[in-house]
Amino acid sequence: MAMDFGYQATSSSSSSFKETIHIYFREREMAELAIFPMNGGSGLHSYGRNSTFQRKGVELAAELINKGIAEKLDLSKFPSSKAFRVADLGCSVGPNTFLAVENIVDSVELKYKRQGLGYLLPEFQVFFNDHASNDFNQLFTTLPQKRRYYATGVPGSFHDRLFPASSLHFVHSSYAAQWLSRIPKELVDKTSPAWNKGRIHYSNSAIEVRKSYEAQFYNDMQRFLNARAHEILRGGMMALILPVCPNGTPHSQVFLNKTTELLGLCLLDVAKRGIISEEEIDSFNQPQYNATFEQVEEILDRNGCFSIEIMETLPFEKPSPMVFSSVLRAGLGPLIERHFGPEILDELFDLLCKRFEDSFSIIDPEETNVSLFVLLKRKAI
Amino acid sequence: MAMDFGYQATSSSSSSFKETIHIYFREREMAELAIFPMNGGSGLHSYGRNSTFQRKGVELAAELINKGIAEKLDLSKFPSSKAFRVADLGCSVGPNTFLAVENIVDSVELKYKRQGLGYLLPEFQVFFNDHASNDFNQLFTTLPQKRRYYATGVPGSFHDRLFPASSLHFVHSSYAAQWLSRIPKELVDKTSPAWNKGRIHYSNSAIEVRKSYEAQFYNDMQRFLNARAHEILRGGMMALILPVCPNGTPHSQVFLNKTTELLGLCLLDVAKRGIISEEEIDSFNQPQYNATFEQVEEILDRNGCFSIEIMETLPFEKPSPMVFSSVLRAGLGPLIERHFGPEILDELFDLLCKRFEDSFSIIDPEETNVSLFVLLKRKAI
């Protein structure tokens, strides 16, 4: 999943793709939009090679999607059409997105056949969406050769409309909607009670900081849901997979928040050596919010366009320190590089790996590292 | 327009996009498929900066498309849908493709409004198609900010199916369908009468060479038309713009064939200096066929799925030697680089520019440099 802070990056043949990624974090314009994608390509630190953390969720979610399609999808609700359209929002590059859409295609085909509608089997058109700065060249050149769908790429922010009205049958979005569309400006405003000095996230910060993240997340999710409500056919479905904060767990205890805090401490270590300044840390905030179950339910309820068909938690194994620091590097590397410069990356993630080695024995991810799977159906309002 | 000779290129973040373009011209496997795109990016030799030759055609064709949509498109033939889907096949990168699709969107909107159907105005979804090795990153990051359509990219060869059945309302393809899907293997077979020794095109070669190009073009066009016949709704339209050979003009007199011959002579010049070998030239053939009007009509007639609504020639001005050698470099550069290596490019195109300077005064492009515009309608068979 790449993020859109509204800044249009342009690539040129003379500069590498990574050089074209721009983040625009001028203090006074913090609320402006900018873009950063996951690491593209297929190199050591690429998202493609470091997405096993997310893939686990994709696999667990796949079974729930199969169940949901088998039990909850009503094919008779769709207008007759030769095409069944699937979108993966915040797809980044493969292979996770390819596995996810293949599973959906398989499930829908099976449903047609089981209902004796094999003769009506539609053709599948799959839309891979991410920000325009995502490495679509990589995505397109690594598409599975033997695919049973017509592949398309859709550049743009999923907080806005991306598709014609009532044109999608199934939407999938995995570990993407937790990313904020922008950093609230008060987080970098020295005069605000939400100024997040010395920290890069909300989990151990003043309540105003968390409230500011929360408000942005609520706003972004409403935009996301409203856009999808237009685009998804009545009876169409949407599977969302999100990292969350279990009800009753303090935000500071959530595994992902703890690891982000450790990343912040590593940045302070780097600052102590004079390689970056503390002001640079003050103006950096990780644009991700892990909502509680209750908050996700509240947001869906407020929106009102979708019914909740399945809502379950996805547990997962504790990753190794090495694997998880690579996961964070693939996901956050471009963002950190843009803000602090490329020279700190190796040192920073080495430090992070060491901190993970010291801490992972006392962090219990089984209770605090939880993802939420929600399968929604577009209501016929 | 990028070409697909069936070889899957992969890009990585550590290598530039150009380095990822592979052409696979082993003599014995000449008939295999491979890919080469136009020059990506926005640099000096990019297609984006060197597509004025094609843009002229786009502009002239735009007026004919406006006329065709105003007079020939029957909106009542389409099933009610909130989306009007447009595809540009062989789009390369902007700006030509953006101008072309904007013109189509404008024309269709105007038609709705003039017919008093403004209240039914559809949303537009535009599919930009080219081979997977095309620079979609460049295309996506340079999309017009204020566009009135949902943009998508479709990677793949237009000689095969790219879209669900009956899903497109208007297809546009400009200076793309003249590219062959592959080089016929007999052209590089020393035992064949079609062996094209010492030449890179058919225009001054043995009749067997031209027949071989012709057969490939007929085959490719049937694949192209059959795929589109499935994808375009009944009543939907397709605008094709192709460089052609006017009836009665010998192939060797056609402006584009003459310039290709001059390119072949420049390659021989380079070979004389020992920088490349004559065998390398023997195994290189420019995969483009410029059909006669009659041949295009015959192909459309044989296919039978489309009626010809407008068929006109597009004249154009003689380009300057400098401009036209840049145009050829943008279009053929990646192909030549892959076959002969990157070191010959500057010298080769300098030589070509000089040959153009010597020859352009005696080449009369007004008679021999002609493009064909055909507006087709999908028959309701």
Image: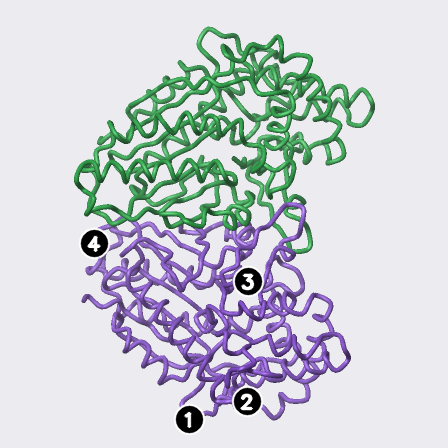
Chain colours: A green, B purple
Front-most of A197 and B94?
B94
The residue furthest front is B191
**Which labelled disc corresponds to residue B204?**
2
The residue furthest right is A273
Mark found first going from the N terminus, 4 or 2? 4
Mark 1 and mark 3: span between their CA atoms?
A: 32 Å
Instruction: Count residues near mark 4 (Cα–Cα under 10 Å), then give few for <14, some for 14-19, many for 20+.
Output: few
Tell me where residue A260 appears, x and y as whole percent. 62, 19
Mark 1 and mark 2: span between their CA atoms?
A: 16 Å
Tell me where residue B255 appears, x and y as whole percent. 54, 85
Q: On the image, numbered disc 4 is attached to which residue? A: B79
**Residue at 28% from the left image edge and 55% from the top image edge:** B165
User: Residue flagged by tag 3: what amino acid is it?
Assistant: Pro
Compared with residue A3, is residue A306 higher up or lower down, i.e. above or below? Answer: above
User: Residue flagged by tag 4: what amino acid is it?
Assistant: Pro
Tell me where residue B125 appears, x and y as whole percent. 37, 51
Check if mark 1's residue and mark 3's residue have beta carbons within 8 Å. no
**Residue at 26% from the left image edge and 47% from the top image edge:** A122
Q: On the image, numbered disc 1 is attached to which residue? A: B248
Tell me if residue A338 can be seen: yes
Compared with residue A53, is residue A75 higher up or lower down, i.e. above or below? Answer: below
Mark 2 belongs to which subunit? B
Check if mark 4's residue and mark 3's residue have beta carbons within 8 Å. no
Tell me where residue B209 appears, x and y as whole percent. 49, 84
Of tags 1 and 2, the one toward the viewer is 2
Q: Secondary structure at mark 4?
A: loop
Of tags 2 and 3, the one toward the viewer is 2
Of tags 4 and 3, the one toward the viewer is 3
